[in-house]
Image (cartoon, rainbow, N blue to C red):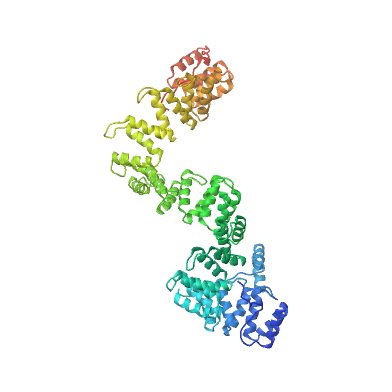
Amino acid sequence: MNPEMSSAGNPVRRGAVIRPVRAALASYAQKDYASAFRRLAAVAATGDREAQYQLGLLYARGHGVVASLGDAVVWFRRAAEQGHAEAQHQLGVICLHGGAPQGGVDRWYDGAAHIDKDTADRNCELLFPNGIRVLPNESEAFHWCHAAAVQGLVEGQAALGFMYARGLGCELDYAQARHWYLKAAEQGSAAAELGLGILYANGFGVETDLPTAAAWYEKAAAKGQTEAQVALGLMYAAGQGVDTDSARAVSLFQQAAEQGNPRARYNLAVHLLRGDGAPRNPVMAETYLRQAAHQNYLPAIMSLARMYSLGQDATLNQTEAAAWYRAAAASGDIEAQFTLGALHARGEGVLRRLSDAASWFERAAAGGHATAQFNLGVFYLQGTGVERDPAKAAMWYRRAAEQGLAVAKTNLAQLHIAGEGVPRDYETAAVLLRQAADAGEAEAETGLGLLHLQGHGVDRDPDAAESLFHRAAQRGYSPALLQLGHFYSENHGRGTNYTEAARCYRAAAEAGQLAAQLILARNNLLGTWGARDEEEAAAWFRRAAEAGHAGAQFQLGTMYCTGQGVSRDLAEATGWYRRAAEQGERIAQYNLAVMLFKGDGIDPDIEQAVEWYQKAAEQGLPEAQMALGDLYAAGRGVPLDRDAARNWLEKAAAQGYAAATARLSALTGNRAPRPASGAAPLQARSGV
């Protein structure tokens, strides 16, 4: 916080100045600050208020002495207590805003204190007995600004109007604000003219009067007041209180931007990007945005982030975008915090680090960002980037739900249905789902339909369930089509409707619903809804298999192995068996071992065959256990080991597998069991 100086750069005051003070001011004008300081210090010590005021200015500016706002306040206060109006105003402004030291004094103290705080404190007290920082004190600020104002000091009157308008150190009083602003404006104060413009523009203590507001802004803008230039520019851009004139708006923004006003730079950039009031110039727009962003102006920071993330009017650069989002996020912008979390979750422009994503979501969520709250709920429920905690998931879902986020209500309802993180409560779940369904949330409509079908938390009402499923399906929500398929394939008091069930299942399957694809495949294979259609079954098993379903991969392998619904192709069969086996499907593991052992559809590889037999056997498949026992008994692919053979055959026999019992008898009678090379692949023993 620096005190104001005259246009010539010299300390000034009104009224008579004694000769020693005039001599000091002459030295100051010649930039002989050391001499000015010595002379003013000597005169100030005698109690001269002008010298005290001027000495305060030197301390505040660090001219002829080490800058010390604490010492400046001491001398301003001495002069102010003697009625010096300028000192009263300067003291009021310092008390209003507070201030930190200049010239690196704070860095010196912090560095020294880190090494030896006691010594740093002693040295600080020796060098700066009046302290190095001034804390804000609005009450005292009001007292001194009022004192200066009643003496007729224009700066004091404008400052007092500002304090009344903001309720700083006093009760909010727009009438008093207008009174003091008018007094200062009569003396040509640009700050007061700006203040009057704000009062009339917003209807503070007066009727809203945009033309009058524009007139006051015009007066202040003509004097170079940058905030007035920006305000007036916005009025010309919007046609509020004045005729729309984009070129005039650009001119005003340009004037304020040249003086370093960040809002002006931002708005000028917006007009240059649009080509509104000036030729379109994205390069200059980016320059102004960068200038404003480096002044920590959040709208400019966010604009740069969006420009680089979308590649609009700038080269697409996710790394640059992430850097600007980080700057905005660090300044507390919750939208930037949320976006930065999303970037870390996706790994766009930053490393994909889910713990960082969770951290930024949590900061945005704490600030009230509903989607961040929802995302954080998902993270806690899944244990993504944080330790899994369903109770915290429920808490964040609830906070997002309280802001009206329908999907959060749906997820919270699901927790109440499952009794996970919250007590099981179907009634609460039904209320939440109803609210979300009324907002058009298809998943909620489907969930509420299921509650009506089951009579949980609501009356059992199949008709309501059917209606809700249809509403959700019409929104394109494919799980609702799956539920309709289930609904029509079951008897809910009106019999079954397999034709409609098949139609709904097919629509769900076409939309990618894995369960529907498997149902269609199974029913076509078995002919449940009519004639068997093995080709159709194979096609749906392939869709499910390509989506990664291990059971479908195994079934498709079996169909290629037997030529059922597809041309027989052992190589294709082996490939699908391997994909299912790698996901832990034990029969696929066994079948892959058989194919490798026999060299069907693949080059024979007994060592690999043994590995897959082992995996299937460890999952309790008796066929694999018997095959592995045979191999150990014969020493094929493994060392001869009758104990190991007996162990595996006993495991298979214990499951009632008769062939293993016979093998075990042969082994006990010291007869080698028949080799396992004749084993054949197995087909599915249950539905996929």
Q: Is residue 649 left or right of residue 508?
A: right
Kindly identify the residue that appears in the image at 48 percent across and 65 percent down: 239
- Residue 484: image quadrant is top left
Examine the rendering and report whether any part of residue 644 can be seen.
Answer: no
**Percent x, y of residue 109:** 65, 66
Residue 474, above or below 157: above
**Percent x, y of residue 423:** 37, 46
Residue 230, above or below 449: below
The C terminus, quarter of image: top left
Tally of marks: 0
Q: Is residue 463 left or right of residue 327?
A: left
Residue extending farthest to the left is 493
Residue 411, above or below 238: above
Examine the rendering and report whether any part of residue 201 can be seen.
Answer: yes
- Residue 536: image quadrant is top left
**Percent x, y of residue 325:** 56, 53
The N terminus, quarter of image: bottom right
Q: Is residue 462 left or right of residue 35?
A: left
- Residue 31: image quadrant is bottom right
**Percent x, y of residue 83:** 57, 85
Kindly identify the residue that appears in the image at 51 percent across and 47 percent down: 386
Q: Nearer the viewer, residue 197 or 83?
A: 197
Q: Nearer the viewer, residue 80 or 528?
A: 528
Residue 564, above or below 249: above
